[in-house]
Amino acid sequence: MPRSPEPDHQANSGARPRLAFRVGVTGTRAVPADRLADLSARVRAILRHIHDEITALADHPALAWYYAREGGALQPPLLRIVSPLARGADRLVAKEALALGYALNVPMPFSLDEYERDFRLPNAPPTDVSEDLEEFRGLFAQAGENWIALDGDRETSDAAYEAVGDFVVRNSDIVIAVWDGGHGNGRGGTRDIVHFAAKAGVPVWWIHATQAVEPRWIDDIQDLRDPVITAKPEDKLHAFLRQRIPPPKPVLRERHSWLAALAFPPAAANDPAGDYFAEAPLPSYGVWKLYSRMMLFASGCKPPWTPPVKPQSEPGAYWFQFYAPADARAGEYATRYRSSYVWVFLLATCSLLFGALASMFHGREVVLFSIFGFGVTSRSAVILFAMAELVALVTILAIALMALRDDWHVRSIEYRLLAELCRKQQVLAPLGRALSFGAVQQLATLMREAEAVPAAPGRPQSKLAAEGDRSGWVSWLFMAYQRAALMPRGTIAHLLPGVRNQDVLQDLVEEQLEYHSGRAKMAGGAAKFFEHNGERIFGIVLFCVFFKIILTLRTGSPLTPLEDWVTATLGLLGVILPALSAAAVGIGSYAEWQLLAEESNHMLELLKLAKQRIDRINLKRPLASQDLGAEADAVASLMLQDLEGWQRLFRVKIIETQ
């Protein structure tokens, strides 16, 4: 959630991803000699197919605006192969990829020295040990610094191989599996990796290791269970790349009301991804700080705020460059949107008051008071109050049109989702973990539901719903960032203390504890302020009405001038105070401060438990990185669930305004 109630102004949001694509590999270590030539040809064909498809997309002029450029032209595509370089399929695919210009990334289950022992084990295939090591080292050298050694050991070798297989899947856009379809060699084998990929939403290009059959495209777990082939894998790959690489197409603006018809011209297209890249800091006018100042006044507390700090790790710093502008823009639009509805409530209250005052003097021809010999009549007061009412209504209309035209509400949600996704990945990346495409898509779907305006009875479905959704750009851009993301490098055991203490505990958990603690106090204080003052105003109104009735029904002589003035004043207060009370109730109800406080208190409890679990992790234990990664993943999921709750809340708010 937002790091600050007052957004900081940074450079524009034009941080573009580099066009990239990652291919993982898993498969048998014992490639049959009579199948080697055929398997090499099949691997070469798919790798070249990917290379040619990405190159063709890179030549498309429209993509140059959405991806990183050099001198006005799109940067050359970055193609990577993620291979542990075990003998057999891992090396076969790596060799073919390197020959086609792919960059090599090597994850290993153990340290380099320990991993090389794999090629000397008694049950290894009968190859010359020195030749095997020479082949491995020759390929490993071509990876340069792009390697990572997980913190497994021989006693947990099965779990270590499973961890490195999961690493391959998490950091790949597609996995090539050279597999015979069997159960493999136990935990962490090819079968487990293929099933993990199918469940995680990473497609698998399956080349049969022992049979000369056509490759298969595995989209999900059902494709493994169902042998029926519905389409050629090349067609599936083509559609997959056309879906993931180009940005979403512009969609039509929704003109579901006469206000929207005024805000948007007919058939106005909306390109939210392009708009995001063109974003610049919004001017910080004081008029748009009304919400934060009201919160500060009502709650009596201002939570401490520190600007986001760039992580020291390379993977974290990579994600920070995308998080920072999205966070700043989300804060700016949220500030405008929240202040806009406060202004609308206040102006609506003023309009009601002016209308009531005009009606009080309507039909009366009296001189109210004189200034420099000029009398102000009740007729003049009626005209004055009517004009003031008109100004208030026109101002409300102007605010509504600006909010619709510039999408303050929708952009604040979309940019917040993008910022939170990048921020979570900023913490997960140093551990080699990644948010799954399925999880990102689920959040994008919830956002699409929140943005959709339900059709009223008798009204046709909106063109926006028919033409496509505008929120798909968030998941597209996040996955584009992820495809080009830096992977952790070096021995992960050496990185764990810094990752746990700084990236996970300090930058994620502690910051969230501070944020939710401040939000709970501020929202709870504001809710109590409006609730208590609403009760006080109600009591004052009761007193005014009661006292006015007494004065009016009083028997005897006519009302004295003082009593007449008191009666008029009480009548005026009887109009003003209920209007103010209604505005306060409306603002408080729309802002959901009590709900905010309850959600933050709930988050505080869960985060404190997560902190205790993270503190207890023994970093010297084998595969402690997996435990730390799982806990960081759980915290990230918890925070995204908090965001998901806001998606549902905003959907309710949109329905309420229809």
Image (spheres, rainbow, N blue to C red):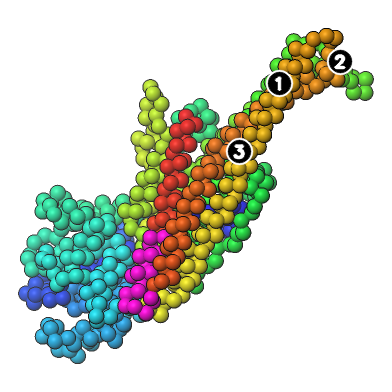
What's the residue at 23%, 69% (across, down)?
25
Above or below residue 123? Residue 581 is above
- Please, what secondary structure does the residue beneath circle 2 have? loop
Determine whether, in the image, residue 254 is placed left or right of residue 235. right
The residue tagged 3 is 531
Q: Amino acid at mark 1?
A: Phe
Visible in this render: residue 251?
no
Is 383 in front, or is 298? 298
User: Circle 1: is it few (<14), some (14-19), or many (20+) Cα within 10 Å?
Assistant: few
Q: Residues within 10 Å of mark 3 (few under 14, many from 20)?
A: some
Report the span colored magenta.
618-635
286 left or right of 629 in image: right
Q: Residue at x 11, y 51 (%)?
A: 228
User: Residue 619: within the magenta?
Assistant: yes
Residue occupying image coordinates x 64% and y 31% = 581
Instruction: Identify the amino acid type marked 3.
Output: Glu
Q: Position of residue 367 (x, y in %)?
A: 85, 15
Horizontal and vertical percent for residue 562?
86, 20
* Residue 588 locus on image (x, y percent): 57, 38
* Left or right of residue 81, residue 631 in this image: right
> Up-down: is 563 above or below 16?
above
What is the secondary structure assignment of the residue under circle 1?
helix
Asked if residue 305 lies in the magenta stretch, the reply is no
Which circle marks residue 339 in the picture?
none
